[in-house]
Amino acid sequence: MIDHRLLASQFRCDLRIFWRSPQSRYFTVLLPIVFLVIFAAIFKGRTRVDGQVVDITTYYVPGIMTLGIISASFVNLTQAIVAQRESGVLKRARATPVPASVVIASRAAVGVIVALIMSALLLVIGRVAYGVRVPGSTMPGLIIAVVVGAAAFCCIGFAVSTRIGTAEAAAPVTNLIVLPLYFISGVFVPEDQIPSFLRGIAAVFPIRHLAQALRIPFIHPHGAGIAAGDLLIVAAWGTVALVLAARTFQWSPRTA
């Protein structure tokens, strides 16, 4: 059992470390907002999604939200874990009375909280600047998609961190993983403009399914907005990654 008071203390510490890092704040909080403003300024008109014709900004708000969630829970987390492992921070943490489960759960909780904050900011900007609305009835589906997506990608981040040998390689590796998938998963480019064989490749990976789960509450006003099938695929990726991370996670520097 996890000591909840110890977890809360560790969580506050990790959250402060995150907000005190200019790089983390920029790439996780500011960069998705910049992307949304740029895409909304460049691309105009409407697009077709799941048989619905919607404004292009309605398409891009959940798309950029996908980017923000992955930045918070996968890219930033993976890079931080590798950097702290190679600098010996994780090894020292392992030697303290704080259980490993608390350290891991705290990092994952920070990723989820930052993803929720990022998603809320994008929702407000989308509503105020571009008139993008989310029906109240589908808001539960949107919140569930954010939480499930952030938790799953945190687990994937822990798993991927075990395959990165140096802190210098963390940023190139994580960006090499996500950037091509952003383009073929409908995050940067509307799906009706992506060749079918690329959509087929994207369907194997969780980014496309997270983007779809986030988009459903925006374009389908009826029901709770829960994309159960897509969320199950995202959760399955997270579960497999969690099992892999539990077996292979490393606390000591690999370059020592």
Image (tube, rainbow, N blue to C red):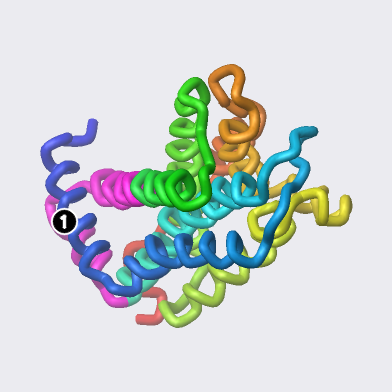
Q: Quadrant of residue 188?
A: bottom right
- Give the magenta-colored segment's residue range: 87-115
Residue 26: x percent and y percent?
Answer: 37, 70
Residue 67: give x, y in percent of width and height. 53, 56
Above or below: residue 159 compared with residue 174: above
Q: Position of residue 140 (x, y in %)?
A: 46, 25
**Left or right of residue 192, residue 13 in this image:** left
Q: Main secondary structure of the magenta part?
A: helix
Residue 22 image position (x, y, % from top left)? 29, 73
Identify the residue shown where x is 24% and y is 63%.
Answer: 19
Mark 1 element type: helix
Residue 245 shows in this picture: no
Which of these two is toward me, 106 or 21? Answer: 21
Q: Specify the amino acid type for callout 1.
A: Cys
Is residue 200 visible in the rendered structure shown here? yes
The residue located at (75%, 34%) in the rendering is 52
Residue nearest the observer in this picture, 218 or 185: 218
Q: Residue at x 66, y 28 (%)?
A: 229
Frontmost residue, 127 versus 183: 127
Say few, some or many: other residues with alpha carbon within 10 Å of mark 1 (under 14 / 14 to 19 / 20 or more): some
- Left-right relation of 47 to 94: right
Residue 21 in magenta stretch: no
What residue did someone put label 1 on? Answer: 13
